[in-house]
Amino acid sequence: MTDHPTVPPDTRPYDCAADLSAVRAFVSARALAGGLPAARVDLLALVVSELTTNTLQHTDGGGSVRVWVEAGQLCCDVVDRGGPRPTAGRMPPADAVRGRGLAIVATFCDEVDVRPGPEGTVVRVRFDL
């Protein structure tokens, strides 16, 4: 594994669907700067898009996204005021209208953790560098 310098955490708030493009660009830029390969940056952007969309659909208000590098991993927190949620699950049938977001998150991340925090629920995803 290549040694990468630690990138200090950077945060981007969001509170409406119009913010999500800027959130994906923010996460992608920070991930590239942290040494995540471009193909995995696209997966991270997809994961963050799913999590932030869930925030806007299932909670009151928005949230924030933090990105940093730690111990050979790109780390990203998606924080919102929603309650705890499962992150593992099976992909729903092809004809299902909803339910793919958290299955996508579990599929593409190297690690996923959900925990309460002072700002609300924190979904932390990690991608190995």
Image: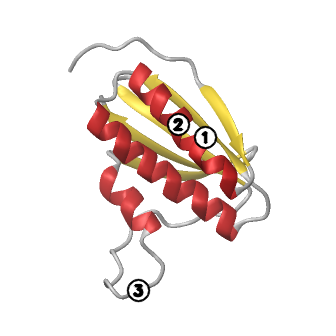
Mark 2 and mark 3 in contact (Cβ < 8 Å)? no
As helix, strand or loop, the secondary structure at mark 1 comes to: helix
- Residue ID at (35%, 48%): 109
Q: Compared with residue 92, is residue 124 higher up or lower down, i.e. above or below?
A: above
- Give whichever of 92, 115 is nearer the camera: 92
Give the image quarter of residue 16: bottom right
Q: Position of residue 92 (x, y in %)?
A: 36, 80
Q: Identify the residue position indicated by label 3 in the image.
A: 96
Mark 3 to mark 2 CA distance (whole Å): 29 Å
Q: Quadrant of residue 93?
A: bottom left
Distance from disc 2 to disc 1, alpha carbons, whole Å, reads 5 Å
Using the image, tell me which numbered label, if any, was put on residue 1.
Answer: none
Residue on which disc 2 sits: 25
- x, y (%) of residue 78? 59, 46
Nearer to the camera, 66 or 53: 53
Question: Label 1 is placed on what type of residue?
Answer: Ala
Residue extending furthest right? 61
Q: Which residue is mark 1?
A: 22
Q: Position of residue 73 (x, y in %)?
A: 37, 29
- What residue type is disc 3 on? Ala
Residue at 54% from the left image edge and 56% from the top image edge: 51
Is 41 positioned to the left or the right of 98 in the image? left
Question: Sequence order check: which comes first, mark 1 or mark 3?
Answer: 1
Q: Secondary structure at mark 2?
A: helix
